[in-house]
């Protein structure tokens, strides 16, 4: 008698189920690897952005240790002048704004008074 390899339906179904589970495992693993790879790329991009911002900020910082006292005094004087000019400009803008509001209110009041006068005049004509 020759040994016959008999594969029953249950053995065949078992093998198919195991193969399906392996394929599903591989698919899930690839999806997780893709997501983590994308996230690591995003994190590295954010790190690069932070490095660039840090370099930019460092380049903007100017060391005052190289300036003489006369130069720093002159810079301070100009900054103080700018501050006082800005304060004066703000005060003038605020004054103009309030005076314009007052003028608008006076014009509105006069118009309303004229309208009331016209209305009362028309009422007297009608009566």
Image: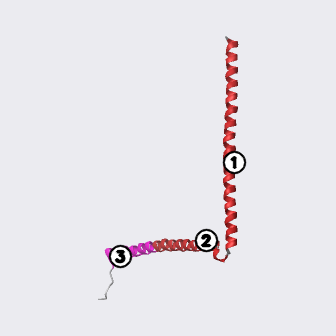
Residue stretch in magenta? 7-29
Q: Which residue is mark 3?
A: 12
Left or right of 32 on screen, residue 42:
right
- Which callout, 3 or 1, points at the residue further toward the start of the chain? 3
Q: Residue at x 70, y 71 (%)?
A: 71
Q: Which secondary structure lies at badge 2?
A: helix
Q: In this rendering, which labeled residue sits more in front, label 1 or label 2?
A: 1
Res 63 visible = no
Q: Quadrant of the N terminus?
A: bottom left
* Residue farthest to the left, as pictured: 1
Q: Quadrant of the C terminus?
A: top right
Q: Which residue is mark 1?
A: 92
Instruction: Give 49 or 70, whichever is nearer the viewer.
Output: 70
- Which callout, 1 or 2, points at the residue further toward the start of the chain? 2
Residue 44: percent from left, percent from top: 54, 74
Mark 2 closeness class: few <14, some 14–19, many ≥20 residues within 10 Å = few
Res 10 visible = yes
């Amino acid at each position: 008698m020759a040994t016959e390899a008999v594969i029953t339906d249950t053995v065949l179904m078992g093998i198919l189920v195991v193969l399906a589970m392996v394929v599903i495992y591989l698919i899930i693993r690839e999806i997780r690897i893709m997501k983590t790879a994308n996230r690591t790329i995003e994190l590295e991009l954010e790190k690069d952005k932070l490095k660039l911002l840090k370099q930019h900020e460092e380049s903007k910082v100017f060391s005052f240790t190289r300036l003489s006292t006369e130069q720093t005094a002159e810079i301070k004087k100009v900054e103080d002048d700018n501050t006082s000019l800005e304060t004066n400009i703000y005060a003038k803008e605020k004054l103009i704004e309030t005076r314009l509001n007052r003028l608008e209110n006076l014009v509105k009041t006069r118009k309303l008074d004229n309208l009331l006068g016209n209305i009362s005049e028309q009422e007297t004509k009608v009566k």
